[in-house]
Amino acid sequence: MCFGGIFDLDLKQERLEEVILELENPHVWQDNERAQALSQERSSLEKVLHGVQFLSQQLEDLDSLVLMAKEENDLAAFGDILDDIASIDASLTKLEFRRMFSGDMDAHGAYVDIQGGSGGTEAQDWAEMLLRMYLRWCDQRGFKASLIEASPEKWWYQKCHHSCGR
């Protein structure tokens, strides 16, 4: 089965072969950064290629199962086939998501700064909800996320400090 198009499998396979040849060269290992970058690229390429090969095999198996279920008029098998199709669709969606983050800079980290600004309690609450949303989003997609700094807004402390006479 040929997926082509968005996945560029032929190009990925060619690049994987090039990377493997490069990694077999002992001189590459003298430059740790280059060797590490190549190893990461190999891992990424292998994940995509193996994932697509696995999905392709699953589709071929489903094709055979559909023919058998049709010949035997097995309605229960069609229910199982629909479940398998949903599973394949979810896996394909994950592959597409990985493809969207396959640019040169996409493997690098990013800093996100969320500030409630001078909007008071509601703005601070919104900033905290946004933070939780981003952290959950990263967690659900397998991204590493860490909170480097969180500082509560000081406006309420200043108001309390002045009004309490301290």
Image (spheres, grey):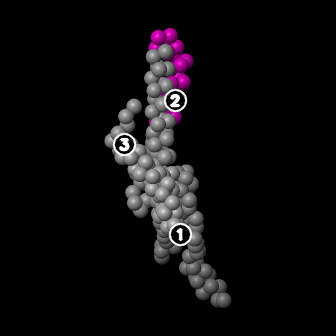
Q: CA distance from mark 2 to mark 1?
A: 44 Å
Please identify, in this view, whether the residue under mark 2 or under mark 1 is nearer the observer: 2
Question: Which residue is label 2 attached to?
Answer: 84
Q: Is residue 42 magenta?
A: no
Q: Label 3 sits on what residue type?
A: Asp
Q: Classify the position of the C terminus by image quarter.
A: bottom right
Range drawn in magenta: 69-90
Crowd band around label 2 with a 10 angstrom C-alpha radius: few (<14), some (14–19), many (20+): some
Crowd band around label 3 with a 10 angstrom C-alpha radius: few (<14), some (14–19), many (20+): few
| Relative height, residue 47 to residue 163 (above, below) | above
Q: Residue at x 45, y 26 (%)?
A: 60
* CB atoms of marks 1 and 3 within 8 Å: no
Please identify, in this view, whether the residue under mark 3 or under mark 2 is nearer the observer: 3
Q: Residue at x 57, y 71 (%)?
A: 148
Q: Residue at x 64, y 89 (%)?
A: 165
Question: Which residue is label 1 attached to?
Answer: 124
The answer to whether residue 130 is seen in the rendering is no
Taking depth in this image into account, of 69 and 45 the one nearest to the observer is: 45
Q: Indicate which disc, 3 or 2, sits on the residue closer to the N terminus.
A: 3
List x then y, in percent, for residue 87.
51, 34
SS class of the residue under badge 1? helix
Q: Label 1 sits on what residue type?
A: Gln
What secondary structure predominates along the stretch shown in magenta? helix
SS class of the residue under badge 3? helix
Q: Label 2 sits on what residue type?
A: Asp
Taking depth in this image into account, of 80 and 95 the one nearest to the observer is: 95
Q: Indicate which disc, 1 or 3, sits on the residue closer to the N terminus.
A: 3
List x then y, in percent, for residue 92.
45, 40
Q: CA distance from mark 3 to mark 2?
A: 27 Å
Question: Which residue is label 3 attached to?
Answer: 10
Q: Residue at x 49, y 15 (%)?
A: 68
